[in-house]
């Protein structure tokens, strides 16, 4: 089979991959329907009603913007939310003897 695949052109190989992908999805869908049917039958045999919902990816939480709490008046681009490690610009200014309260907004 490997020799046959090696002899295919790019176009033929792309078609083969597309057809194989479609066939795989079809088989997975058939198997899924079969298993769901078995689950429903089994549940019905013991008097349980089952509602099966499609599982999907859980929606991710979008990170919310955090307000800036500290800003360097000499350079407004230097800003910090107060979360995480102190930025280098703030550390340098604090080491130089300035107070963090000076940068509070």
Image (cartoon, rainbow, N blue to C red):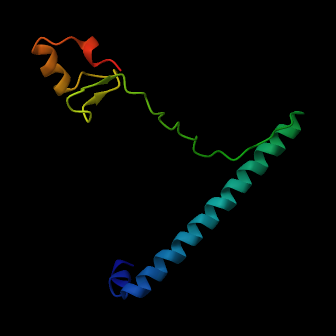
Q: Quadrant of the N terminus?
A: bottom left
In this view, which residue lies farthest toward the right?
A: 47
State the residue at coordinates (64%, 67%): 26
User: How many numbered marks does the figure carry?
Assistant: 0
Relative to 62, is 28 on the left or the right? right
Residue 94, by quadrant, is top left
State the residue at coordinates (36%, 22%): 69
In this view, which residue lies farthest toward the front?
A: 74
| Percent of width and height locating residue 90 | 20, 22
Relative to 48, is 75 on the left or the right? left
| Percent of width and height locating residue 8 | 37, 87
The residue nearer to you, when weighing 48 against 64, is 64
* 29 over 78 or under it: above or below: below
* 3 over 68 or under it: above or below: below
* 55 over 70 or under it: above or below: below
| Percent of width and height locating residue 95 | 11, 14
Residue 30, by quadrant, is bottom right
Relative to 63, is 10 on the left or the right? left
Relative to 59, is 50 on the left or the right? right
Residue 105, by quadrant, is top left
State the residue at coordinates (83%, 45%): 41
């Amino acid at each position: 089979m490997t020799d046959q695949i090696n002899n295919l052109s790019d176009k033929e190989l792309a078609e083969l991959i597309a057809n194989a992908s479609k066939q795989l999805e079809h088989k997975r869908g058939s198997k899924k329907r079969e298993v769901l049917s078995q689950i429903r039958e089994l549940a019905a045999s013991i008097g349980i009603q089952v509602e099966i919902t499609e599982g999907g990816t859980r929606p991710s939480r979008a990170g919310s913007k955090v307000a800036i709490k500290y800003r360097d008046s000499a350079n407004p681009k230097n800003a910090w939310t107060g979360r995480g490690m102190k930025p280098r610009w703030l550390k340098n200014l604090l080491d130089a003897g300035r107070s963090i309260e000076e940068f509070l907004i």
